[in-house]
Amino acid sequence: MPAMAIEQTTQNSEKKTSMRTLTIEPLTKEAFAPFGDVIETDGSDHFMINNGSTMRFHKLATVQTAMPEDKAIISIFRADAQDMPLTVSMLERHPLGSQAFIPLLGNPFLIVVAPLGDEPVSGLVRAFVTNGRQGINYHRGVWHHPVLTIEKRDDFLVVDRSGTGNNCDEHFFKEDERLILAPHQ
């Protein structure tokens, strides 16, 4: 169950608008399940390989693709931190494939997500923070904010889909639907 959000009123031009401040939840497999997979070793099944010298944490997430000719690809994203508090004015989704982010430098990062649907519902948006040893895999079509690093600059191993067709839809919230992400409060 998500924690209760704090209401915050901000001045915007000449009128007041109320923007919900997202409560940042610790990332757990159970809480994140509606949006995708948490990629972590803690509490995950494993078996020994390589003559007993290696623990394999098997199938922590599944790469989803829409078409048989699609390929799963591996990239590195180098992300720069955004100024906080951040006004969340848009989310994106990838309708043709999943997208996984695994931190390479061991730093926590922020996640903003909304459930599947034709467009994200502002009132259902949730925020999470990783412990620095967790990655995430957004399922196909899950609305999410582009990568949000807490550090000034951070690197992520990204596993996603390459193929034909538009695989990035963006949704921009109306002014009264925007949200505040304030990790330092």
Image (cartoon, rainbow, N blue to C red):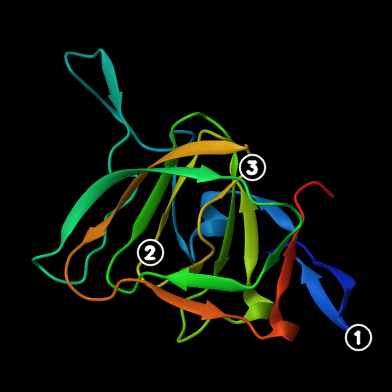
Q: CA distance from mark 1 to mark 3?
A: 32 Å
Residue at point 80% right, 67% down? 5
Q: Image quarter for residue 20?
A: bottom right
SS class, disc 2: loop
Type of the residue with mark 1: Glu
Q: CA distance from mark 1 to mark 2?
A: 40 Å
Question: Quick check: 160 above or below 119?
Answer: above
Front residue of 117/166: it is: 166
- Residue lying farthest left? 69
Q: Are marks 1 and 2 in contact (CB under 8 Å)?
A: no
Type of the residue with mark 3: Ile
Q: Which numbered dot is residue 14? A: 1
Residue at point 80% right, 75% down? 19
Front residue of 104/87: it is: 87
Residue at point 56% right, 37% down? 153
SS class, disc 3: loop
Q: Image quarter for residue 124?
A: bottom right
Residue 22 visible in the displayed image: no
Q: Position of residue 22 (x, y in %)?
A: 74, 64
The residue under label 2 is 139
The residue under label 3 is 150
User: In terms of sequence position, does the residue under pointer 1 or pointer 2 come before the other?
Assistant: 1
Image depth: mark 1 or mark 2 in front: 1
Q: Position of residue 47 (x, y in %)?
A: 27, 28
